[in-house]
Amino acid sequence: MAKLDKIDTPDSIIEKKAEKKEAKGSKKSSYSKKKKIKKHILNGVAYVQSTFNNTIISIADTNGNVISWASAGQKGFKGSRKSTPYAAQIAADSAASKALEYGMKTLTVQVKGPGSGRETALRALQAKGFKILSIKDTTPMPHNGVRPPKKRRV
């Protein structure tokens, strides 16, 4: 028969591990979390994509790295309310406030699409205090349209 002198309980195991650590000398981790530094970006480009169903505003630095973005759908609008000018204004306000945290002051705006939130998004960006240098319309235009369907055979 096996001889049972001492049974290890979870508490005694933890105590043993603590004693071992004290004997070795407690080492601190060499990894230390670095403090996140906010970039200070003065100029940027605001891309406003306004479709019939939604409005998306992206604010990027001059290299093209997106700093903040917002859309009408992200702000909680659903269905046909997403395509309204009011939803575009709320989305532009949200994207602008995030960009202001980075110290952005001037914007060049590129507007794309036929939606109703184009002008309202621009006004919202201007109302937030951005100096808008230029507004460019980058809506894609078809040169000759799509290929027509083939002739019907009856």
Image: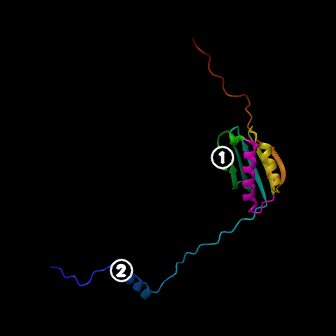
Decide: marks 2, 1 in contact (CB < 8 A)? no
In the rendered structure, the answer to whether residue 97 lies left or right of residue 16 reads right
Residue range (magenta): 84-105
Residue at (77% x, 43% y) in the render: 118
In the rendered structure, the answer to whether residue 47 lies left or right of residue 15 reads right
Q: From the image, give the main secondary structure of the stretch colored magenta.
A: helix
**Please, what secondary structure does the residue beneath circle 1 have?**
loop
Asked if the magenta segment contains residue 142, the reply would be no
Rendered position, 25 above or below 32:
below
Q: Residues within 10 Å of mark 1 (few under 14, many from 20)?
A: some
Q: Which residue is mark 1?
A: 73
Residue type of the residue flagged with mark 1: Gly
Rendered position, 25 above or below 31:
below
Residue at (72% x, 54% y) in the render: 94
Residue type of the residue flagged with mark 2: Ile
Which color mode does the image show? rainbow
Q: Tell which circle, 2 or 1, labels the residue nearer the N-terminal end.
A: 2
Where residue 51 sits, quadrant-wise, is: top right
Q: Which mark is residue 13?
A: 2
Residue 138 or residue 74, whichever sits in front: 74
Please provide percent x and percent y for residue 63.
Answer: 73, 55
For residue 65, say whether it is visible: no
Please provide percent x and percent y for residue 144.
Answer: 73, 28
